[in-house]
Image (tube, rainbow, N blue to C red):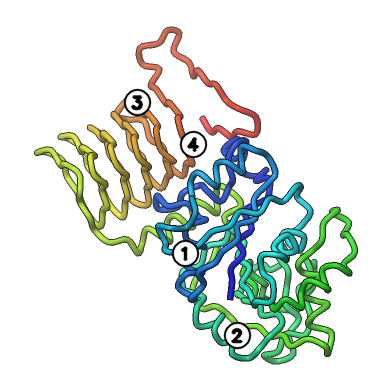
Amino acid sequence: MKGVILSGGLGTRLRPLTHTGAKQLIPIANKPVLEYCIEDLKETGITEIAIIVGYTPERIQSVKETIGDGSRWEIKITYIEQDAPRGIAHGVYCAKDFIGKDDFVVYLGDNILRDPISSIIQNFHQQGLDAGMLLAEEKDPRPYGVAIMDNDTIIGIVEKPQNPPSNLVVIGVYYFSPRVFPVIEQLKVSNRGELEISDTLHTMITSPAFRTGAARIQGWWDDTGTSEAILRANQLMLTGISESIKGTIEEGGTLIGTIDIGEGTVIKSGTVIRGPVIIGRNCTIGPAYIGPYSSIGDNCTIRGGEIESSILVGDTIIDIEPDKRITDSLIGRHSQIYSARKRLPHAYKLTIGENSEVHL
């Protein structure tokens, strides 16, 4: 088997963070979402992975620089460029030459799952399926592709229905044989101007020419397409971290709960950190309060204030008054946040890119 990770998408709901970089590189628990996908595929036994990237030189380069050739995972990664956002099925078709005659697993690069997919995928492979889908229960399935079920058998898919036929949605991990490619070739472009993966799957499910199947996942999953979803996934992922203190804790620094601190980081006297929290390398923290479910990337400096349930991507300076509190925030790389205590007149001073969101 081979793997295909789709790392396209314009990430419009995450701008301005995604103006120059792929949304799949935004870190959760200090690790890009894309790396979770790679590790999940490797655990399945896959050693050759194609990453479909697009659509600007900046996005393509950011993925290649962050992920590399796969050697650190002892796998081989090939990059395939998608010229425009033409849909998930089009992204899959871009990998046709790479796949050849092998079966393969498609992983949407903004999906993250708690539990490994290896046992489900191996079962699909042993059954000789042409298409296998992973299903998850959702309280409100209307925003997703929803499975039409006959007892435990999937008999169709309907995209974003107002009256869902079930509460089972098709998540962004798929198993295919090479027989999927002729199906994609026959697809009609949807009203969105894309080749839809739901149309691909529905065609295969409803045709007796193909063997298809589905399996329900048991653990949580998330589609990290919004800042709220990223913060939610960050909280879920941090609940499973292990304690590791590689930095320096000055006398008077207080650590409570499960905390992971990287090399070269200094926790200053007077700082209180309450886990679960992960802090990267070469940071200077304090005096400050860092609360639960916070992920702080490499090379950050934090003086003063309280930070909780937030993600600092990295290379960020926060210098604020002790009574200021930042919570439920996603702060991009090279950000600088300062207190206005020494500035007259006392007012907020903001430099904000397009599609930003600020709550004062």
At horizontal 40% and vertical 10% (from top left) the residue drawn is 343
Label 1 – label 4 distance at C-alpha: 30 Å
Q: Which mark is residue 125?
A: 2
The spot of residue 256 in percent (x, y) is 21, 52
Could you tell me which secondary element the residue under label 3 belongs to?
loop
Q: Which residue is mark 3?
A: 320
4 and 2 marks in contact (CB < 8 Å): no
Which tag is nearer the camera, tag 3 or tag 4? 4
Q: Amino acid at mark 3?
A: Ile
Comparing 108 with 63, the one in front is: 63
Label 3 – label 2 distance at C-alpha: 55 Å
Give whichever of discs 1 and 2 has the lower sequence position. Answer: 1
Which tag is nearer the camera, tag 4 or tag 2? 2
Question: Quarter-wise, where is residue 279 in the image?
Answer: top left
Give whichever of discs 1 and 3 has the lower sequence position. Answer: 1
The spot of residue 201 in percent (x, y) is 77, 75
Q: Amino acid at mark 4?
A: Gly
Q: Which residue is mark 1?
A: 75
Give whichever of discs 1 and 4 has the lower sequence position. Answer: 1
Would residue 163 be seen by someone viewing this image from the given angle?
no
